């Protein structure tokens, strides 16, 4: 009897010790914010990619700074054919290294202390509090396999009443009109074992009025409403990035004749031009497979909508 009581007493002591230890051992969700700072996701879920998304509203006096940024950006990392097609649609895309360049720092309003020095497979924590000015919107997303984030540089309140798109068909120039149109990007990424990530970014036009459609999620039929979308499959950007590197996207000129204006330009009472910057912040590779390539994003698969704060 004495032995049983001692044994029970010891189990109670061990239980009191183990309970708080087990509670503290649970990993925090990736991207959790504490005291205004994003914590390094040291306990990230495997096979995920964490990104930071910056939407910059360009002031009229930013033209010279914007041209400097495009000189710092490496647009040659994209295939020549894709670059030509992007330019024809009024779009520019390029890559920046893991050091914030002077032009990007000024556009994001990040001080010198906010530079990133992330190396292969490492997450370098840095605060973007300096970028919290009114003209910069920042969001954090964790991308999982078979999932993509939708990025809208302009929200639904800034739709274009009419967008006329031109295309060549059988050697002839044809026009297609889209009403209540806006541009969006489907962003997906696969984590590689070397600490890099392979991105797929598909531009698309969303237009018209909502329509009923049925989609399959985890083997279940779900009926919901959504507006028609016209994806630009030939403009899909496939790019490998290392932690700390940036993907910069914008328009060639505010008066571009292509699709670029639907994504980055609005002309109401004044010109409203914007820039998209995506930073790869952290990669948690899968433990059993090597994900080097991604299929083109499917606009109707599992979606994670980025909330707008325009």
Image (tube, rainbow, N blue to C red):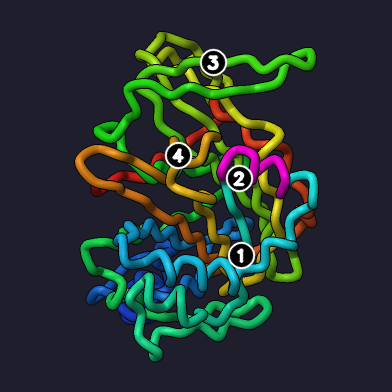
Q: Is residue 7 among what the camera can see?
A: no
Residue 269 point in image, percent of width and height: 20, 41
Residue at image coords 29%, 45%: 308
Judge by depth and name the residue closer to the eye, 92 or 185: 92
Query: What distance separates the C-alpha of mark 1 from that of mark 3?
Result: 43 Å
Query: What distance separates the C-alpha of mark 2 from that of mark 4?
Result: 18 Å
Q: What range is drawn magenta here? A: 83-90
Residue at image coords 71%, 49%: 83
Query: What distance separates the C-alpha of mark 4 from that of mark 3?
Result: 15 Å
Q: Secondary structure at mark 2?
A: strand
In the image: residue 142, left or right of residue 210: right
Q: Which mark is residue 261?
A: 4
Q: Is residue 123 among what the camera can see?
A: yes
User: Which residue is the site of mark 2?
Assistant: 201
> In the rendered view, would you say 199 is above or below 135?
above
| Tag nearer the camera, 1 or 4 | 4
Dividing the picture into quarters, in which one does residue 284 lie?
bottom right
Residue 167 point in image, percent of width and height: 65, 22
> In the rendered view, would you say 304 is above or below 7?
above
Q: Which mark is residue 176?
A: 3
The first of marks 4 and 3 along the sequence is 3
Q: Residues within 10 Å of mark 2 (few under 14, many from 20)?
A: many
């Amino acid at each position: 009897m004495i032995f049983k009581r001692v044994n029970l007493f010891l189990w109670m002591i061990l239980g009191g010790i183990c309970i708080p230890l087990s509670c503290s051992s649970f990993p925090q969700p990736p991207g959790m914010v504490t005291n205004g700072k994003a914590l390094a996701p040291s306990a990230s879920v495997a096979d995920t990619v964490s990104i930071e998304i910056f939407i910059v509203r360009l002031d009229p006096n930013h033209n010279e700074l914007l041209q400097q940024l495009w000189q710092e950006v490496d647009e040659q990392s994209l295939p020549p054919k894709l670059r030509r097609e992007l330019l024809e649609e009024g779009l520019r895309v390029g890559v920046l290294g893991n050091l914030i360049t002077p032009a990007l720092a000024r556009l994001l309003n990040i001080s010198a202390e906010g530079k990133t020095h992330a190396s292969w497979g490492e997450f370098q924590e840095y605060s973007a509090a300096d970028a919290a000015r009114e003209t910069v919107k920042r969001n954090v997303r964790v991308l999982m396999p078979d999932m993509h984030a939708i990025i809208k540089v302009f929200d639904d309140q800034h739709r274009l009443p009419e967008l006329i798109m031109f295309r060549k068909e059988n050697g002839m120039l044809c026009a297609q009109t889209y009403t209540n149109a806006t541009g969006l990007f489907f962003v997906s990424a696969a984590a590689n074992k070397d600490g890099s990530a392979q991105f797929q970014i598909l531009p698309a036009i969303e237009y018209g009025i909502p329509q009923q459609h049925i989609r399959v999620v985890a083997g279940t039929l779900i009926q919901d409403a959504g507006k028609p979308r016209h994806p630009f499959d030939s403009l899909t950007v496939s790019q490998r990035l290392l932690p700390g590197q940036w993907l910069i996207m914008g328009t060639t000129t505010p008066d571009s004749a292509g699709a670029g204006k639907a994504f980055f330009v609005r002309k109401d009472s004044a010109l409203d031009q914007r820039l998209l910057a995506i930073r790869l912040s952290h990669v948690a590779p899968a433990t059993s497979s090597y994900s080097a390539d991604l299929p083109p994003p499917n606009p109707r698969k599992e979606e994670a909508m980025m909330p707008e704060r325009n």
